[in-house]
Amino acid sequence: MSSQPDKITDHSSRYRVPVTDSRLWWLKNRRYLSFMLRELSVLGVAIFLVVYLVQFAVLTSGQENYNQFLNFMKNPFWIAANVIFLAFAVLHSITWFNLVPVVTPVKIKGKEISRFILWGMGLIFWAGVSVIIAGIIMTFS
Amino acid sequence: MKLEPLLWGIFSAGGTIAAFVLPIHIFLNNVAPQLGWISADVVSYNTMANLLSHQLVKIYIICTFIMMFYYAVHRFSFVPQELLFNISHKTTARVGQVLLSIFAVATLIIVIAAP
């Protein structure tokens, strides 16, 4: 009687909202999977920020506690977690800069700047900001 | 809702900040020194205390951390619905607001109190 609508297999329209009963709909194609991974990647962002705050708090409590905290952060579990967070952060950066030219196209003298150039500029700014931050932190160490 | 565009605007700003600064911070603080790729001095007590003694650094941390946390919370507030759990977005958004408020207050206290 109840024929299950299997609209998720129809990719003719790129922006169709999938209608499905399956909680695992995002495993059905790479586009959905990439979307869901990016959605879930913010867990890494939140955990990183909270742990960094804890690091600042421990810093205030004195050098001995802080060194203990640093040792704790060296255990393989945390390193593995942080490598994953880093991979997700990089994925976020790249896909975010892919998105920027689409959301905010730039026109100069009525001519639209190519998305490829805007994307490249995003990556160059990203590299520049990273170098500046690394430079500042290295200067203090 | 008139608030909706503003919320997505902050989300977008937070996402942009995260795209620019998050990878380098994770790399320099949590990955490279621990794996021995760079000197552990980068995360040492003296380095951190020196950095945090600067008002500009404190302002930078407070602004970027709260914006990035907002980005994370706002994005995650839609995940339960996307995974077809029977929770309204009103509820998850409210939970997110509470978490964000706690995080923001904690950030202000911890960063201002830092040496």
Image (cartoon, coloured by chain):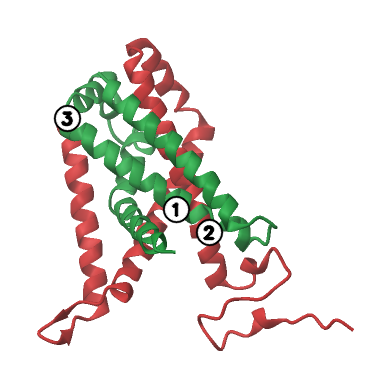
Chain colours: A red, B green
Quarter of the figure that contains the N terminus of chain A = bottom right
Is A117 situated left or right of B40 in this image? left
Residue bearing mark 1: A88
Task: Please rate how many residues cluster around mark 2, counting C-alpha atoms within 10 Å: few if below 14, some from 14 to 19, many from 20.
Answer: some
Mark sitting on residue A116 = none
Secondary element at image label 2 = helix
Rendering coords of residue B81 (x, y %): 62, 60
The part of the image, by quadrant, that contains residue B50 is top left
Mark sitting on residue B55 = 3
Secondary element at image label 3 = helix
| Amino acid type, label 2 | Leu
> Who is closer to the viewer here, B8 or A27?
B8
Give me the C-alpha separation between circle 2 and circle 3.
36 Å
Specify the subunit that label 2 lies on: A
Query: Is residue B88 visible from the viewing direction of this image?
Result: yes
The residue located at (44%, 64%) in the rendering is: B1
